[in-house]
Image (cartoon, grey):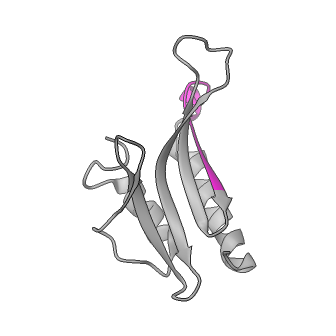
């Protein structure tokens, strides 16, 4: 579990990223959202179904960020084409979640956004 203060900070940072990453004029077609479950924050992309816009939106995981309570660090994971998560080795575990978010945003290896 993420300690309460760390979790509150993570929620604030992830919400800000999700709210600002997608331009307002396309948010009816594309959303970025996050969930926190246990020690893992999951960043997902949501879109309306291409064949039925009135149906439930599709959800595609973009990244997982796991909190290590013992080390008090965040570790970034990316999603393979087959849906399995892989350790993102180009960024060491971080004390500051924002560094993981910044890496996802910059995506220097085209790992998260293609």
Number of numbered markers: 0
Decide which of 79, 29 is in the foreground and name it. Answer: 79
In the rendered image, the quadrant that contains the C terminus is top left
At x 37%, y 41%, the residue is 82
Determine the image quadrant of residue 6.
bottom right
Position of 39 relative to 51 (above/below):
below
In this rendering, does residue 17 appear at all? no
State the residue lying farthest toward the bottom.
70
Position of 39 relative to 15 (above/below):
below
Position of 72 relative to 25 (above/below):
below
In the rendered image, residue 101, in percent from the top left (x then y), is placed at: 47, 61
Determine the image quadrant of residue 92.
bottom left
In the rendered image, the quadrant that contains the N terminus is bottom right
Q: Residue 7: within the magenta?
A: no
Highlighted range, magenta: 24-35
State the residue lying farthest toward the right.
4
At x 27%, y 55%, the residue is 108
Determine the image quadrant of residue 86.
bottom left
Decide which of 21, 10 is in the foreground and name it. Answer: 10
In the rendered image, residue 28, in percent from the top left (x then y), is placed at: 62, 25
State the residue lying farthest toward the top.
51
At x 62%, y 70%, the residue is 39
In the rendered image, residue 76, in percent from the top left (x then y), is placed at: 43, 65
Left or right of 18? Residue 102 is left
In this rendering, does residue 70 appear at all? yes
At x 59%, y 34%, the residue is 24
């Amino acid at each position: 579990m993420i300690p309460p203060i760390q979790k509150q900070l993570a929620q604030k940072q992830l919400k800000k990223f999700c709210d600002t990453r997608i331009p307002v004029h396309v948010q009816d077609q594309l959303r970025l959202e996050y969930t926190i479950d246990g020690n893992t924050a999951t960043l997902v992309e949501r879109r309306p179904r291409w064949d039925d816009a009135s149906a439930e939106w599709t959800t595609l995981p973009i990244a997982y960020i796991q909190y290590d309570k013992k080390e008090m660090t965040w570790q970034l994971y990316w999603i393979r084409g087959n849906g399995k998560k892989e350790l993102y080795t180009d960024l060491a575990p971080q004390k500051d979640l924002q560094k993981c978010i910044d890496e996802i945003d910059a995506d220097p290896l085209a790992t998260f956004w293609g």
